Each structure stands twice: as structure tokens, then as C-alpha cells.
Amino acid sequence: MALKALLALGLALRLRHHIQGPPVDYAGVAAAAAASWIGVPGPGEPVLIAAGLLAAKHRLDIGSVLAVAWAAATAGGVAGWLIGMKAGRVLLTTRGPLHRMRLHALARGDEVFGRYAVLAILLTPSWVAGIHHVHPAVYVPTNAAGAALWAVGIGLGAFFLGPPVVDLVNDVGWLTIGGLGALVAVAVGAELVRRHRRLRARERAGNR
């Protein structure tokens, strides 16, 4: 589905006559965006920022940059989700070192994704959602919306603000890490509260 959408978008862009810049630049944006959303750290944001800066200098078409980045990020997110679903869970459940710990982490992750699916999808790499078998009806639209926010926010930020957007992207990255940490803290806190309630219930039952 995502691959067909990406191919259709590429054909539509090819038919447009006012595209500026060499096709290889758009291919670079697509490759970097897809890699980042599959789960490879690093390439997506710098390349998208560079493309936004080139568009501001009228060397690329900003609309095409945003469309390519969004479609490629969406496709990459789906690819990473499928990789996690097909291979990630198998690796985590395979017997070996720290097997019991891995199973416990997997169970806790399933609980987090079950309660806060949309937030967890937006704050973690795509393959993590695949490992926890997030349903396509939830993952696909959330992934597409997240890719749109990413492409438009960073691409237009670079187009209008220029180099200062780099610092802003770095700050957002730290906010994302903080949000993920907060999500984990909430899950741990909820588990502690539940265990405390169980313990009190057992004590009450034993006193009767």
C-alpha cells in the first residue's frame, strides 16, 4: 500500500512541469526520509533541512520536497513496522541470555502500547510498534499523520527560518526522548501502584 502510494506520487511529480532542481535531489530526500522512518538514526532530518534551505533559494520546489519526504517517511514507517512484526518479536522471544528479562520487557511494552498506542507510536521507532503487533487500523493512519507533521514541520521550518531550525530540531529531539522517558515512568508507576494494591488486598484477606 505504502509502496504504491510512493510510486503514484513519484509519477505525479514527474508529470508536473514546474519542478525545480535535479531529480537526484528528490531521490536523496526520499531515501533519507525512508531510512529514518525505518529506524536508521541520522539521515532524515539533516537532508530534509538541506532540501528546505535549497528550496528557499529557489533551487528546489518546496511543495515537491514536502510531498516526497512525507510519502517516503510514511513508506519507511510501514516497512519498519513490518520488520518489527516479522522479525523483532522472534528475536526477543528466542531463548538465550536475559531471556526472562526480555520476555518481561516485551509484556510491559505490550501493556504500554495497549493503553497509549498513538502516543507510543509517535515516540518510538517504527519497528517497536511492529514488535508489539499494533493493529494496522491504528498504526497506518498514525504513522502517516506523524510523517506529515515531521515533513511539514522540519521542511517548512528550514524553508522559512533557515539554519536556526537545526537547533529547534535538536531541542524537539530531546523533548521526544523526555516524552518517551515520561511514558516509561508512567507505566512503571502504574505497575507499582497495582502491585501495592494487590499486596494490601492480600493483607486484608489474610486478616479476615
Image (spheres, rainbow, N blue to C red):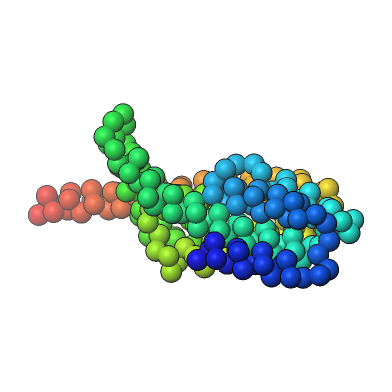
Q: Nearer the viewer, residue 73 or 103?
A: 73
Q: Residue at x 60, y 42 (%)?
A: 41
Q: Position of residue 68 (x, y in %)?
A: 68, 60
Quarter of the image holding residue 7? bottom right
User: In which quarter of the view is residue 11 placed?
Assistant: bottom right
Query: Viewed as shown, does residue 30 lie left or right of 87?
Result: right
Residue 87 placement (x, y as % from top left)? 38, 45
In the depicted structure, whether residue 1 falls above or below residue 82: below
Q: Residue furthest top?
A: 97
Outermost residue toward the left in this view: 208
Q: Is residue 152 visible?
A: no
Residue at 47%, 63% (x, y): give it.
139
Which part of the image, by quadrant, shows the C terminus?
bottom left
Closer to the camera, 185 or 205? 185
Which residue is more in the foreground, 120 or 182?
120
Q: Give the vertical position of 183 relative to 114 (above or below).
A: above
Q: Is residue 156 above or below residue 170?
A: below
Residue for point 32% across, 36% down = 101
Indicate left or right for 190 with 162 as reference: left
Residue 76 in the image: x percent, y percent? 55, 54
Q: Position of residue 62 (x, y in %)?
A: 79, 62
Name the residue nearer the viewer: 29 or 154.
Answer: 29
Can residue 28 be seen by looking at this rendering? yes
**Residue at 35% in and 40% down:** 91
Q: How many marks?
A: 0
